[in-house]
Image (spheres, rainbow, N blue to C red):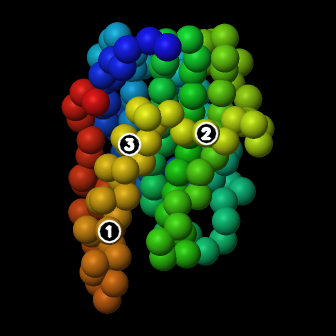
């Protein structure tokens, strides 16, 4: 086991994919941003995954591109059914962004850094959407962004 090291969390851009609006984040080990190849792979994967999204959704969410110590992870998370976060994960254990493949049932864990981003997004969803059920503020949700070390 290695000692915990904080990682960089950076909002990269707001993606518009058809009617979807997705926050793209980078998480990086020992650097400020993920490699550009991983960010491009994350955009491609998100575009493909959102074509097959569950029907009862809000067409908003976030994409994480995690450039880890010895692996790459991309996850596509979007909100639906009021309070549910749909989550799809893609992994490359070799660290090669071109080798990302869909996670299997044995890959169902979430690391502490990815969980940090999901927790941040959960709080933003509660604050701007669930607590304002009669007039959800999706624009405010999309405007709240994580940029720090954690």
Compared across the picture, whether 65 is left or right of 44 comes to left
Mark 1, Cα crowd under 10 Å, few <14 / some 14-19 / many 20+, is some
Gap in Å between the C-alphas at discs 3 and 2? 14 Å
Residue 99, position as x, y percentages in the image = 71, 18
Residue at x-position 30% and y-position 59%: 123
Compared across the picture, whether 35 is left or right of 47 comes to left
Quadrant of residue 35 in the image?
top left
Gap in Å between the C-alphas at discs 2 and 1? 23 Å
Q: Is residue 65 visible?
A: yes
- Residue 126 is labelled as 1
For the residues bearing labels 1 and 3, Cβ distance under 8 angstroms: no
Residue 95, position as x, y percentages in the image = 60, 12
Q: Label 2: which residue?
A: 109
Residue at x-position 47% and y-position 71%: 83
Q: Tag 3's secondary structure?
A: helix
Q: Tag 2's secondary structure?
A: loop
Residue 57, position as x, y percentages in the image = 56, 70
Q: Residue furthest front?
A: 1
Q: Classify 63 as above or below 98.
A: below
For the residues bearing labels 2 and 1, Cβ distance under 8 angstroms: no
Q: Nearer the viewer, mark 3 or mark 2?
A: 2
Q: Earlier in the sequence, mark 3 or mark 2?
A: 2
Compared across the picture, whether 63 is left or right of 139 comes to right
Mark 3, Cα crowd under 10 Å, few <14 / some 14-19 / many 20+, is many
Q: Tag 1's secondary structure?
A: helix
- Residue 117 is labelled as 3
Q: Classify 15 as above or below 35.
A: below
């Amino acid at each position: 086991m290695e000692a915990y090291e904080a990682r960089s969390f950076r909002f990269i851009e707001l993606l518009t994919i058809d009617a979807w609006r997705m926050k793209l984040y980078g998480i990086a080990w020992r650097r400020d941003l993920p490699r550009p190849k991983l960010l491009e792979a994350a955009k491609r994967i998100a575009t493909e995954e959102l074509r097959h999204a569950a029907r009862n959704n809000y067409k908003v969410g976030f994409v994480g591109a995690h450039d880890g110590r010895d692996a790459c992870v991309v996850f596509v998370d979007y909100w639906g059914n009021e309070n549910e976060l749909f989550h799809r994960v893609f992994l490359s254990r070799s660290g090669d962004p071109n080798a990302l493949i869909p996670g299997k049932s044995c890959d169902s864990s979430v690391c502490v850094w990815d969980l940090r981003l999901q927790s941040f997004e959960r709080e933003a969803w509660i604050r701007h959407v669930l607590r304002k059920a009669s007039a959800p503020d999706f624009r405010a949700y999309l405007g709240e962004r994580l940029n720090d070390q954690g």
